[in-house]
Amino acid sequence: VQPNNYSTFYDDQRQNWSIMFESEKAAVDFSKQVCIAKCNSSPALDSVLCQDLLLGEGQGVEGGDSLEVAYTGWLFQNNGLGQVFDSNVNKDKLLRLKLGSGKVIKGWEEGMLGMKKGGRRLLIIPPAWAYGAQGVTGRVPPDSTLVFEVEVRRVKLAKEGSGSDGLSVSSRDSAAPSPVPSSDGFSSD
């Protein structure tokens, strides 16, 4: 993914290609399909698949940094995006999390590393990196592969002290223990 609705890639012969899309939405949709195709063509998904949709700007986030994110989560069904099981898009509250604190599923901890403020990324997360064999009652069936589109809205870097954009993160940010239970507060352990 490149600025100004461009994507670059290379083929099996290491030949470089660029595509310019007519809109940001077209570029984002194409990138999502590329990620889904990667997932469908891999024999077994044993780690998180990440595909940047929009790059964002500034420094990439790392463990210890605090973020506010908007997200939508789908079940991966019939080789593509299935039912939405959770989302905070169009809601008042963003999800606050501190990378590396263990408060969200392992797939998020891994998949969000390096994201930048304003960046959007598609994550395809195998069951072992999500809710495993137990799933989440009434929401996520056991052994589900999950797909999340995450957008980093605000960042407070751990080494900055108080964030330049005024994001303060206190102990209250542990109200949502994982991307799924938005209000019922059960743990993902």
Image (tube, helix red, strand yellow):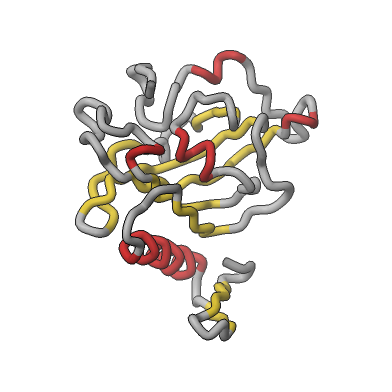
Q: In this view, does 47 lie above or below 3?
A: above
Q: In this view, does 36 lie above or below 45?
A: below
Residue in the image at 45% along x and 53% along y: 49
Give the farthest residue toward the top.
171
Quarter of the figure with residue 128:
top left
Residue in the image at 45% along x and 22% along y: 176
The C terminus lies in quadrant: top left
Residue in the image at 50% along x and 81% along y: 11
Residue 32 position, x and y percent, is: 41, 61
In the picture, measured across the screen, residue 89 lies left or right of residue 63, that is left
Total marks shown come to 0
Give the farthest residue toward the right.
160
Q: Nearer the viewer, residue 122 or 14?
A: 14
The N terminus lies in quadrant: bottom right
Q: Which of 43 and 49 is in front in this view?
A: 43
Residue in the image at 35% along x and 25% along y: 181
Residue 14 position, x and y percent, is: 57, 82
In the picture, measured across the screen, residue 62 lies left or right of residue 77, that is right
Residue 114 position, x and y percent, is: 63, 47
In the picture, measured across the screen, residue 178 lies left or right of residue 43, that is right
Residue 50 position, x and y percent, is: 49, 54
